[in-house]
Amino acid sequence: MKAATPDPSGKRTKARQLAEAHLLLTCRDVSAMSSLDTQHLVQELQVHQVELEMQNEELRWTQVQLEASRDLYDGAPTGYLTMDSTGKILEANLPACTLLGGTRTQVLGRLVSRFVAEKDRATLRRHIVTLSNVGIRHTCEVELRPQGDMPVWAQFESVAMQGEAGSLVQLRTTVLDVTLRKQAEAVLLTHTKHYAAVATLGLSALLNQDMNLVLQEATRLVAVALGADFSKVLELLPGGQVFLLRAGTGWPDGLVGHAQVRAGLDSQAGYTLTAPEPVVVQDLNLETRFSGPPLLREQGISSGMSVAMYVNGRPWGVLAAHTRESRLFSQNEVNFLQAVANMLGARLERQIAEQALAQSERLLQEALDERERMAMNLHDGAIQSLFALGLTLREGMELIGESADAARTQIAAGLASLNGVIRELRESIRGGTL
């Protein structure tokens, strides 16, 4: 019989050794064996059979545990990656594959950077280099390659598994979907920008007496806060047929303060004045409610939103923001624009009230000046009359010794003059000139 091939590793399991021994024994003539030897052989074979059955059961149990571990690995809520020092993916569970946007076959053996957005690949490379240099736990956040309309963000947290010489052997990485948190942070940042813009505009409205400066600052802040290419304030001119581009940001030189837009329903601004809510346009070329005026089309504007501005309950104009790229403005952005329009409306109302107050003060001062002038005139007339009365009475006193009748006549004339002065003073007092 051909001898068994030696084990290249020099290591044989106990089961292997027993099997070879039993095989050699079976080559003997069993009929020539003694009863004792036969019993011994049978016993050895039975023991070996039991041992094989036990090992087989242990293998089956191990297989079950491995399958359970794989189920836990693939069913985990977190993505897991095993990568080498270059970032090549050696192992990945199903959540990680789903997050990266591929199957396990498409993911394994590929560089993880291929699944990351171009703008964030440098961040991921620094993440890997940091681990290879230091060998510590490190975390980074990157945007993954687009899988649809919405961006997907992932957090990579890695631990370096190092060899005996301290060299990087593998990276064990958890991959978490942090898209919702990133979206919340973006919303919070947007709100912060909006609040800051409103606060800045409020301060400008308080400090600046020039309404043109306030309106211009408002358009600048709106453009910055919304990331818009253009913003504008249109004032409805008397007659209600035309808007004037009163203030704006992003427009070519010479338009602000001069350009006009029709106020009819065929323009976005005119439509806005009659609409019950803010007007949002995602694509002007597909808009059916109104046509875009030359002011918008000449600048290649595609999207925009506009809100009406009211002063003392009456339409005053329109505040709007526009972009060249097609864009759908969020409700928060619409609310921000409305808040700015309300603030500008309140500032215009204050300006009108201040102008009315200044007019009232001017009229009151004019009335006071006229009263003072009339009082001075009356004062001078009264003095002159009293002076003349004094002279008349003096002459009457001198005539008493000469002619009683002449004295009485003179004194009567003085009394008549006195009564005239008194009457004039009473009329002035009743008329409110004193």
Image: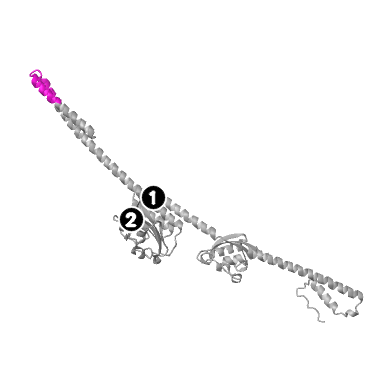
Residue bearing mark 2: 235
Q: Earlier in the sequence, mark 2 or mark 1?
A: 1
Asked whether residue 168 is in view, the answer is no
Residue 405 in magenta stretch:
yes
Residue 25 in magenta stretch:
no
Q: Could you tell whether 272 is left or right of 175 in the image?
A: left
Residue 343 lies, in percent from the top left, at 39, 51
Residue found farthest to the left: 402
Q: Nearest the camera: 321 or 92?
A: 321
Residue occupying the point 19% across, 34% down: 377
Circle 2 crowding by C-alpha within 10 Å: few under 14, some 14–19, many from 20 = many
Asked whether residue 352 is in view, the answer is yes
Displayed quadrant of residue 83: bottom right
Q: Residue type at mark 1?
A: Ser
- Main SS of the magenta part reads helix
Q: Residue type at mark 2?
A: Glu
Region in magenta: 391-415
